[in-house]
Amino acid sequence: MSSNRKTAASRLERKNYKWIYLFLLPSFIVFVTFYIQPIFTVFYTSFTKWDGFNKPKFIGLTNYINMFGNTAFRYSLKNLLLWSFIAAVFHVGFGVLVAFAIFKKPFGWKFTRAVFMIPNVISAAAWAMIYRFMFHDDMGMINNIIRKFNPDFHVQWFYQSPFAFIAVTLTWLFYAVIVTLIVLNDLFAIPGDLFEAARVDGASDFQLIKYIQLPLCKNAIGTSIIASITARVAMYEQIALTTAGGPGDDTMNLPVILVKSIMDLKYGYANANGVIMFILGLFILWLVNRLFKMDESVY
Amino acid sequence: MKLKNIRKNLSKVFTYTLLAFTVIISIFPIIWVIMSAFKDNAMILSDPFALPKQISFEPFVYIFSKYDFGRYFINSFLISVSSTLVALIFFAMGSYVLAKYEFPGKNLVFILYTVTLLVPAQSKAQPIFSLIMKLGLYDNIWGVALVYVSMGLAISTFILKPAFMAVPKSLDEAAVIEGANFFTVFWEINLPLAKGGLATAGILMFLGNWNEYFYASILTSSDTTRTLPLALQFFTEAFSYNYPRLFAALTVVILPGIILYILAQEQVQASVASSGIKG
């Protein structure tokens, strides 16, 4: 009887195949047009010299060799390394700290969680502008606050080395609401009896955090680190609309180089940059997964 | 006992300091921008933290009358709404069959769709730029909208697949027995029952599209196709010494996103937490 029903069901499903693939078609066309085709083009043309008008000419690894010889690119990697470290330790650290504070449900926790999200729902371009004005020497509120204590303070934050790097970092450093929400999600999922059992055994707050809460939100923290470093690889508005990579190459990064190469009609070179971004993303995923042993279940 | 009290109080002080800091850094820059839009130049410079003395809408009137700010607003609106709606229909159809039917290649398709989350959007810039050129849609708002349709593929699949899985299969079977065809089962039974997930995915995609800057900046060049986030850059140049107008422009750009978020807070927060994306 049951096997009968099963074959009947699968016959029904086979009759549906036409519909199923028809339903899948629109999203699949989007996938092929805007993901598969571009990714193949990027990989293939990164080994060519190409201006977009003439045929791509195969030049082997020349684009990559030129890239590593280029100062702007080397600065980009150095900045990315430093920003990734700051993101993984301080940005994620701050988000986790806020999550643990909110988890105890102190007065105003819902309000804090709601408000913390606001910088993330407005345009990154607008946020970059807001920061540019906040750090403006005349009208910016940062320098106006500092001048209340030190009337002679004048710094062009986004135009002076080494302040530009600091200012760009501050546009995202504390805005870790994604981290907070992901970690909170895991904290709220911890079974309550686990806490009670630990309390009965006489565990202190600190021990609770160290032996129960932190290990159980290991995956959430790993995910946060991946997301925050990936966001550093793809950071664009916060740089393009403030320093444009300067002063010198102080705040240069890969997307800024990529856009400039497209505008200069150096498509092959632009795409070699794209390949590096792509590979960095996969590498970070692999590395964090390994470090956090994220595929192992925590329960 | 006393020591324990001190420690308890210290931890309280720490918690509230942390929360206060979080609230201030999140909300203060925005309040400062909106307040400054209603002040004059001199007051912005001398009294950055004071409330505006009188409310003047002159900067807002100016940016909408002397500049094509209305145009930018309409462009942003048309692009975001059309791309979100089309994407929502496409991805709902895809997620629906991924959630409810068995067919060859099912798992592969799901993995491919969701793994697109890891592709940095900028890394595909050149091929997408060339594609839009080839289609003759460069410097055209529909070219931008077309690219935006593709942006929410991974997030939508993450959100919509479980939403359709939550619709009981018995309802589908009952409808089939009563003679409903495949499309009717989808359109009249599953879509209405998955509206929570559809709303969440729609809001997230709309916010992303409304705020997008990178592709808008490389796919358009003229004044008539500009979107709001793009316009900001040109406003900085045009109003470099008229701060209230600058702040008025910023206010117009950021306010719609904030309002939408306030209206749909729970959904945005829940979806961000479960899929761990954006930003």
Image (cartoon, coloured by chain):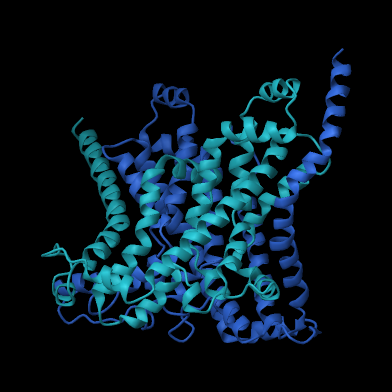
Chain colours: A blue, B cyan
Height in image: A192 above or below B271? above
Residue pictured at 58% horizontal, 60% vertical: B148
Height in image: B125 above or below B188? below
Residue pictured at 15% horizontal, 63% vertical: B55
Answer yes or no: is residue A291 visible. Answer: no
Say whether residue A52 is left or right of residue A216: right
Q: Quadrant of residue A275?
A: bottom right
Choose between B59 and A296: the one closer to the eye. Answer: B59
Q: Quadrant of residue B25?
A: bottom left
Say whether residue B150 is left or right of residue A244: right
Percent of width and height locating residue A93: 43, 53
Percent of width and height locating residue A50: 74, 84
Percent of width and height locating residue B155: 59, 49
Choose between A280 and B3: the one closer to the eye. Answer: A280
Percent of width and height locating residue A140: 25, 73
Answer yes or no: is residue B17 visible. Answer: yes
Picture mark count? 0
